[in-house]
Image (tube, rainbow, N blue to C red):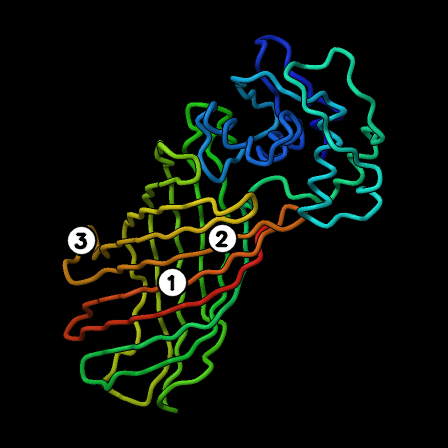
Amino acid sequence: MLALIVGQGALAAGPPHAHVVSDQAPSLWEIGIYLYGRKNAYLDIAKWNSIEHPYVIHPGQSLKLQKIPTLSPEQGAAALLEIWCQEFGLPKTCAQRATAPEKITTPSADPVPSTVTKTEAATEAADVPLQTPSSSFGIGPTQVTYNETGLQPISLQLLTAKIATSGKIDDLLRADSFRRWSWGISGYVTATTVSTNTTSASARYLGLNARITYQLPWPTDRWSASISGGWFYTSMWGSIKAPSAIFGFRDQRGPQALAALSRALSSAGSGSIYVKFTPFVDGFEFSSESGELASGMSYTHLLKNRRAIILSIDRSVLNIQLRSHHVSSESFSFGASLAW
């Protein structure tokens, strides 16, 4: 975890104010403490390098520094251990070995000795989160109101499973020109029908999303905004004791547009909201009567070992014209996910 200290953690050769991220890619939050001894120094580093929330960095990336680091490597190691003990509750032994950093205005030519060795620092920090997780799995309840021509409204309580994965496009292409771009794939499926307002009905939903996202330049450090485009697919199937009913829909799909706004609430927590629109296509034509409008919010809290807990609320309204039947489905979904 602390290859920042062990390997490439010193100032990079070349420009006088630069830093090369270690092979294990510590977060900007850790780098800020290591170089400057301040918890919020990562905001300055992010601003100098135009890095937006969630501040993802990768090994070998060179960071520009507009201020000379105020801590020596040994002081930085001690500062990190002290912060880790306070923030993440590492073993008490680390608190006994960590020493508070002595701030200085210029890099120390003769660093102040620390009671923490580089090897000890790397060992003790083995379970500190480094960066925003990119995959998640979760489950939660969903309340659905289903309407169809010729049927009374049907209320369903479902249990929904969700899975998602994402990544940075510049990591795939190794091109800094795509550093604001990312990709994401997600899906959901009904695990089981918990209850309905009629004993004659049961239903399952399936949804798949594929998106490309662009992170917009943003004038403040804690706020970030993004726009996405991609493809959405959904189906619903089930059974009901009504001979003339279609009950459900299959293979509804179309392009989607999504806008999101996020805010960093702390060094480990962030919140976001989004709105999404998908017009469904019929063959090669858009259907003016069929589509989905969705919105939601989530809170992400980083844990140890590069994991996170995500709490989310989503609302979706589907309208679909099927032959002589009109189908609508409105859902509220609550979820808790583990990300890694």
Label 1 neighbourhood size at 10 Å, few (<14), some (14-19), many (20+)?
Answer: some
Q: How far apart are marks 3 and 2 (CA)?
A: 27 Å
Which amino acid lies under the numbered mark 2 shown in the image of this protein? Ala
* Mark 1 → mark 2, Cα distance in angstroms: 15 Å
Q: Identify the image quadrant of the N terminus.
A: top right
Q: Which residue is drawn at 30% across and 53% down?
A: 276
Residue visible at 66% across and 47% down in the picture: 87
In the structure shown, which secondary structural element does the residue marked by tag 3 occupy? Answer: strand
Task: Calculate the distance from the C-alpha at mark 1 to the C-alpha at mark 3.
Answer: 25 Å
Q: In which image quadrant can residue 36 be found?
A: top right
Q: In this view, does 264 lie above or below 309?
A: above
Q: Where is residue 119 in the image (x, y as percent from the top left)?
A: 83, 31
Q: Mark 3 points at which residue?
A: 286
Percent coordinates x, y for residue 338 in the rendering: 58, 57
User: What residue is disc 1 on?
Assistant: 314
Q: Above or below — where is 95 with respect to 67? A: below
Q: What's the amino acid at mark 3?
A: Phe
Which amino acid is tagged 1?
A: Asp
Query: Which numbered marker is on residue 164?
Result: 2
Relative to 280, 88 lies left or right = right
Mark whose residue sits in front, 1 or 2:
1
Indicate which disc, 1 or 3, sits on the residue closer to the N terminus: 3
Asked whether the beta carbons under mark 1 and mark 2 sit within 8 Å of each other, the answer is no
